[in-house]
Amino acid sequence: MATIARETQAEHQIGDYAVTDRYVIDVRDQAPDMFVDHSTTDWSKLTWGDVGRPFKVEKWAEEKVQYEKSHGEPLPVLEGWKKFNANFHKYFAQTVPADQARTKA
């Protein structure tokens, strides 16, 4: 008995890309370009309205406030980083199980 080969038409063609509410159809034959080329951006015309204002810190460390009161000038950036690193380092230097046991006691 001879079998008859049936050719079926594919529902999607190479190059199709669609996002539905339940799944994504992605039969592209090339990877998507993940980087946006900003080489032609005129950075001198960029405004805060274009990118959004950065987060504004309203609550400062007590050490910073005291330094600025006593010296009459802003805390130098290098000095601020030194203080930050010293405070952050304590999380690496502590022994968590011992601290947890002491806290529970």
Image (spheres, rainbow, N blue to C red):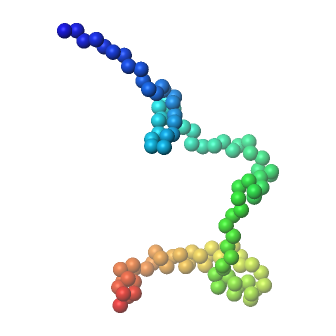
Q: Which residue lies furthest to the front in this view?
A: 21
- Taking the spot 68% from the left edge, 76% from the top edge, the residue there is 58
Point out the image quarter for the C terminus: bottom left
- Taking the spot 64% from the left edge, 85% from the top edge, the residue there is 62
Point out the image quarter for the N terminus: top left
Considering depth in this image, is 5 or 32 the residue closer to the camera?
A: 5
- Taking the spot 48% from the left edge, 35% from the top edge, the residue there is 26
Image location (x, y in percent) of residue 15:
51, 28
Can see residue 79? no
Left or right placement of residue 20 versus residue 53 in this view: left
Q: Which residue lies furthest to the top in this view?
A: 2
Left or right placement of residue 102 versus residue 45 in this view: left
Q: Vertical placement of 83 versus 3: above or below?
A: below
- Taking the spot 69% from the left edge, 84% from the top edge, the residue there is 65
Left or right placement of residue 8 versus residue 80 in this view: left
Q: Which residue lies furthest to the left in this view?
A: 1
Image location (x, y in percent) of residue 44:
80, 51
Q: Residue furthest bottom?
A: 105
Q: Vertical placement of 16 versus 46: above or below?
A: above
Considering depth in this image, is 24 or 95 the residue closer to the camera?
A: 24
Image location (x, y in percent) of residue 36:
63, 43
Q: Quadrant of residue 40?
A: top right
Image location (x, y in percent) of residue 94:
43, 80
Q: Vertical placement of 54 versus 14: above or below?
A: below
Q: How many marks?
A: 0
Can see residue 22? yes
